Amino acid sequence: MKNILLQVKTDSVVVDTISSTDSTTFSIWFWVAIIEFVIIVFLFLKLKKNRKDLKFGDLSKDKMRNAKKSDVDMDNLMNSINGSKDLYKELSRTCHPDRFINSDKQKVAEEIFQEISKHKRDFKKLTELKERAITELNINFK
């Protein structure tokens, strides 16, 4: 009988220690979950604030409509995208100042070549420079 009582007492002690360990573990994990939740909320609020600070965040519909109505020379834009590279190569070869060494046209060729280098992506300006090269340098383009 003593053995049974002793065993019951030891079982209750084991049960008490197990239950106290469970509640301590539960308490620790509960606080870890609370801290993780607070961190997630903080990061979410920070992300939301950063989205408000974006440059495009304050664009209204009126500004978007006005941007669509702006005066953009689409013909020059498309020509600049498609044809400026070839025209630039042609002009830079034919108007290079080294082709006019020891002549009075060398300074004019230097000026035109510098303008060509500045405006190598602008088709409209390159066509104007081509006309200038034809008149001032007497260059015949094919």
Image (spheres, rainbow, N blue to C red):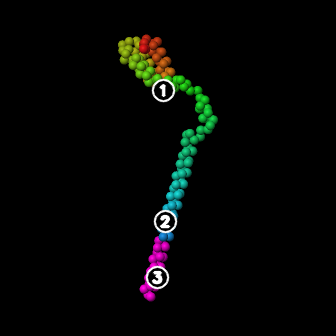
Nearer the observer: mark 3 or 1; the answer is 3
Q: Which residue is mark 2?
A: 28
Mark pair 2, 1: CA separation: 64 Å
Mark 3 packing: few (<14 Cα in 10 Å), some, or many (20+)? Answer: few
Q: Which mark is residue 71?
A: none
Q: Position of residue 106 (x, y in %)?
A: 40, 15
Q: Are marks 3 and 1 in contact (CB under 8 Å)?
A: no
Residue 56 in sight from this viewpoint: yes
Magenta residue check for 9: yes
First to last magenta residue range: 1-21
Q: Residue visible at 43% across and 14% down? A: 141
Q: Which residue is mark 1?
A: 81
Q: Position of residue 102 (x, y in %)?
A: 36, 13
Quadrant into which the N terminus falls: bottom left
Q: Residue visible at 46% across and 12% down? A: 135
Mark pair 3, 1: CA separation: 91 Å
> Is residue 57 left or right of 121 when viewed as pictured?
right
Q: Position of residue 36 (x, y in %)?
A: 50, 58
* Image quadrant where residue 69 sits: top right
**Element at label 1:** helix
Q: Amino acid at mark 1?
A: Ile
Q: Are marks 2 and 1 in contact (CB under 8 Å)?
A: no
Q: Residue visible at 52% across and 55% down? A: 40
Q: Which residue is mark 3?
A: 8
In the rendered view, tell whether residue 65 sits above or below residue 19. above
